[in-house]
Image: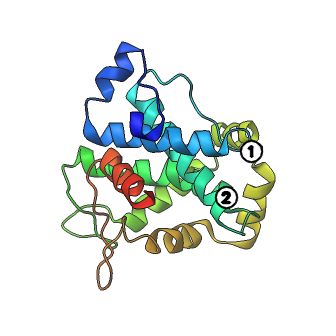
Amino acid sequence: MENQGLEYPHNQGVANILTNPMLLTLFCRTCSIQNEYAGKVGYFKYHLPVEVKGELINNFMEALATLRFHQTDNKEYLPALELYIFHFVLPNIAKYMEKNELFFLSWNPSYGNKSVRDLIKEAAIFTENENFSDWLIERDIERQWNTLIERENLVIITTEYLRQHPSIFKSKPFFEFKHQYFRDYLAARAIIYD
């Protein structure tokens, strides 16, 4: 942490979380992204100070979306799409896998398990919930979200987005989510971005 100019947190709960190397990786990468882009865009909401693992994971998802926002020219609806994927789609997939003790999940249904496609559709249903509207308003991305869903089929564009990331899916003929635990996926993303 000292090499990256980061201060070790004084909160004992966070210090205990950071004994896990994957979570330490997430914390360091999140802090460096937060420092680099602090105050530049208001779409991204960090929980500070971090006190529990869930806040650390939330902050890293925000950091990934912040980083991608600054690396792309497509600012029309990309932040809304990525925040939706990081907060709703990928956690839904990982939660299902962890609950069912699956170490990979196929793109198509197999062996009585849901498919990645099924879980993407499940996440899309949540967007009709009033809480989702509040979430968009809180981040000031309601206009971007409306532009996205007017132009694109949510399930299709989410699918295309996920297929572009080799840290998420193996290549043809199977598209398999490779991380049983969501924190493993996030740690892999942190390492890739470094």
Q: Residue reaching furthest bottom?
A: 173
Q: Determine the image quadrant of residue 170.
A: bottom left
Q: How is the image coloured?
A: rainbow
Q: Residue reaching furthest front?
A: 3
Name the spot of residue 97 as percent of width and height, x first.
27, 52
What residue would you read off at disc 2?
70
Identified at 59% across, 54% down, the residue is 67
Q: CA distance from mark 2 to mark 1?
A: 10 Å
Helix, strand or loop at label 1? It is loop
Q: Earlier in the sequence, mark 2 or mark 1?
A: 1
Q: Which mark is residue 123?
A: none
Amino acid bearing label 2: His
Name the spot of residue 122 as percent of width and height, x first.
47, 55
Q: Is residue 51 visible?
A: yes
> Is residue 10 shown left or right of residue 66?
left
Number of numbered discs: 2
What residue would you read off at disc 1?
40
Identified at 49% across, 61% down, the residue is 121
Name the spot of residue 57 as percent of width and height, x first.
44, 38
Identified at 72% across, 62% down, the residue is 77
Identified at 52% across, 74% down, the residue is 160
Cβ atoms under marks 2 and 1 closer than 8 Å: yes
